[in-house]
Amino acid sequence: MNFDFLYLAKAAVIGVVAGLLSGGFGIGGGMVATPMTRMWLSLDPYVAIGTSLVLVAPTAISGATRYVREGVYSKFLARACLVPACIGTVLGSLVCPYVNGHFLMMIIALLIAMSGLDFATGLVGRLLGRLKKDDAKVASLAPVGKLTFVAAAVGLATGFLSGLVGVGGGFILVPAFVYLFRASIKEAIGTSLLTIAAVAIPGAVVHAIHGHVNFEVALAMIVASIPGARIGASISMRLKDSHLRQAFGVMLLIVSFVFAAKEIHSLVTHR
C-alpha cells in the first residue's frame, strides 16, 4: 500500500468529523464517512461503503454501551430486530457488488439530503416531540404476534440498506420505533444503536471478504473518531440543540448536492 502521511491524515480528519457528528447528534458515522471517503480520498464506491461500515461498528457500540448499561432500550425490539437485521446486512453486502457503484452513491446522496432536510427544518423532530414520553422509566414493549413480525421486517429492511450502501440505518430505525411501536425517544435511540452495532459487524466482514475494505483508512478513521465523539458530546452539552441541528442539516444538504453532482459528472465522463 502506497499511502503517505497526508493521505492517512485526511482519513483521520474524516474520522474526527464522523466522531464529532456521532457524539453531538447521536448518528452513525457511515452517512458522513461514505461520501467523504469517496470524494476526498477517491476510494472506489464499493470500498467507500465497506470501509465506512468498519467505522460504524465501534462508534455504534460505544454509543449503545451507555444505553444498555442504563437499561434505556427495548428488549422486545432488540430481540425482534437483531437477527433479521444481521441477515439483511449480509444480503445487502452480497448484492452490493452487483449494483452499479454510481447508483449506490446516488442513493446515499438522496438519504443524506433527506436527513439534512429534517435536521435543518426540524419537521420530524417536532412530530416526534409530540410522542415523547417524559417519564424517566422506560417501558418494555410486549412481544405480541403482529408487532414481532413488523419489527422483524423493519430490522431486515434496515439491515439490507446498511449492507447495500454502507450506512448504519439509525435514521430509519428511530422513527420506525417511535411511530410504529410508540417507543420513547431515548428507548428508540438506545435500541437503534444496539441494532446498528450488531448490523455493522457482519456487513463489514462480508465487504472485507469481497475486498471492499481499506483497513489503513478504516483504522485511521476509528482512532480519530474516538476523541471526536467525546468532543462532539461536550460541545452539544454547551450549545443549543436547535442551532446544532440546523447547522448540521445545512451541512448535510451541501454535502449531498456536491456529492450527487460529483457522481453525475463521473457517470457522464465514465470516470
Image (cartoon, rainbow, N blue to C red):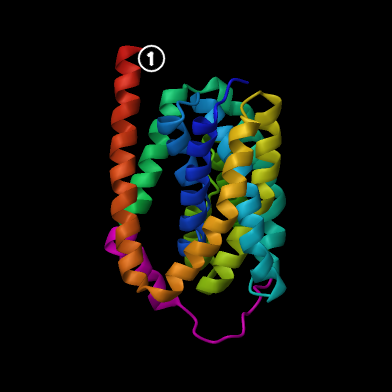
Q: Is 237 inside the magenta-drawn segment?
A: no
Residue 57, horizontal then vertical, whole percent? 64, 48
In the rendered image, the residue lying farthest to the top is 270
Q: Which residue is pictured at 54% across the width and 87% down the height?
A: 135
Residue segment shown in magenta: 118-142
Q: Is residue 90 left or right of residue 247?
A: right
Q: Is residue 51 left or right of residue 99?
A: right
Q: Amino acid at mark 1?
A: Arg
Residue 61, horizontal then vertical, whole percent? 66, 57
Q: Which residue is pictured at 44% across the width and 68% down the height?
A: 235
* Up-down relation of residue 178 to residue 264 (above or below): below
Residue 44, horizontal then vertical, whole percent? 50, 23
Front residue of this view, candidates 115 and 91? 115
Residue 156 visible in the shown view: no
Q: Quadrant of the N terminus?
A: top right
Q: Which residue is pictured at 69% across the width and 53% down the height?
A: 82
- Which residue in the protein does label 1 denote? 271
Quadrant housing residue 190? bottom right
Q: Which residue is pictured at 30% across the width and 68% down the height?
A: 243
Front residue of this view, candidates 19 and 140? 19
* Up-down relation of residue 209 to residue 228 (above or below): above
Residue 64 visible in the shown view: yes
